[in-house]
Amino acid sequence: MSTASLSRVEVADIALALFTARGYDEVSAADIATAAHVSRSTFFRQFGTKDDVIFADHDDILEQVDAFFAARLRGQVVTVDARTDVIDAALLVLDRFLARLPSIRSRDRIVRATPKLRDREIVTITRYQKVFDRYLREQLPALRHIEALQFADIVATTHNAVLRQAIREQISPDQAHRDLAAELARLLTIFAPRAADHQDAAQPKLPLTAADARDHDQQPTAADAGSVVVVFDVDAPMSTVGRVVQQALRQHRQNRI
């Protein structure tokens, strides 16, 4: 393979091999550049820092998710409900990771052994939740922001829990796909689509009058509606995750009545 044909992910895999063999702190950016047969300037242009290279595949996958959603926002792909689109996108993300499972397992070991990478990983994976949330709000402008945020967060969290089980060889890749599809299908029964969620989607956005603005300011905000935070042990079974999330949301909604 010529060096010109190396993708960012392929360079990242070379870096992972070096980190695994020598230890993360013992490998420099120059070492990675040399092993990948690229100049240091090319390496830094592609990745910025050594800390960035290990998460290079996230950028590529997020671009695919953006394209997936953009096709539906432009009407190039027919969409029935934005929530289903988000679920399909989460399954797409899972499949991309499962296709590179040996590399993903290597990264998991390196991240767990390197404290400063753990924080970087948390920041990186929250990007998926933000992309899901943004799509829901763009596609369903009448949907309350807090509901879009809750749905996006639970989808991303459930995806991460299933992927973690596959990474640690608790389930097979095929089982991981089936489990995520089943858990997210159950999630749809909690966040059932309502006609009101779609009522503004096809309406043109008109400038707000002064009276409209006053009325808007008096509407409950996402902060007024509150949010639900549920914490799980990393080894919690998916049946427990789904049941506890459902109970927490039900209790939250009852408390607001």
Image (cartoon, helix red, strand yellow):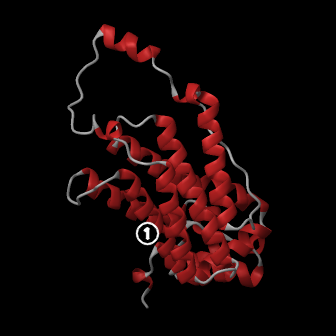
Residue 52 against residue 208 in the figure, above or below:
below
- What residue sits 35% from the left and 39% below the top? 197
Residue 8 against residue 69 in the figure, above or below:
below
Residue 181 against residue 173 in the figure, above or below:
above
- What residue sits 61% from the left and 51% below the top? 246
Q: In this view, does 234 lie to the left or right of 214?
A: right
Front-most of 85 and 110? Answer: 85
| The N terminus - image quarter | bottom left
- What residue sits 42% from the left and 57% below the top? 86
Front-most of 49 and 41? Answer: 49
**Residue 248 in the image, given as x and y percentages of width and height:** 66, 45
Quadrant assignment, res 159: bottom right
Q: Is residue 83 left or right of residue 251?
A: left
The amino acid beneath tag 1 is: Leu
**Residue 32 in the image, given as x and y percentages of width and height:** 61, 76
Q: State whether residue 226 appears in this view.
A: yes
Q: State whether residue 44 appears in this view.
A: no
**Residue 94 in the image, given as x and y percentages of width and height:** 51, 71
Please give the residue where the numbered disc 1 appears in the rendered image: 92
* Callout 1 crowding tier (Cα within 10 Å): few <14, some 14–19, many ≥20: some
**Residue 172 in the image, given as x and y percentages of width and height:** 60, 84
Quadrant assignment, res 64: bottom left
Q: Farthest residue to the bottom: give it.
A: 1
- What residue sits 60% from the left and 71% below the top? 163
| The C terminus - image quarter | top right
Residue 119 against residue 194 in the figure, above or below:
below
Q: In this view, does 72 lie to the left or right of 131?
A: left
Describe the element under mark 1 as helix, strand or loop: helix
Front-most of 13 and 130? Answer: 130
Q: How many marks?
A: 1
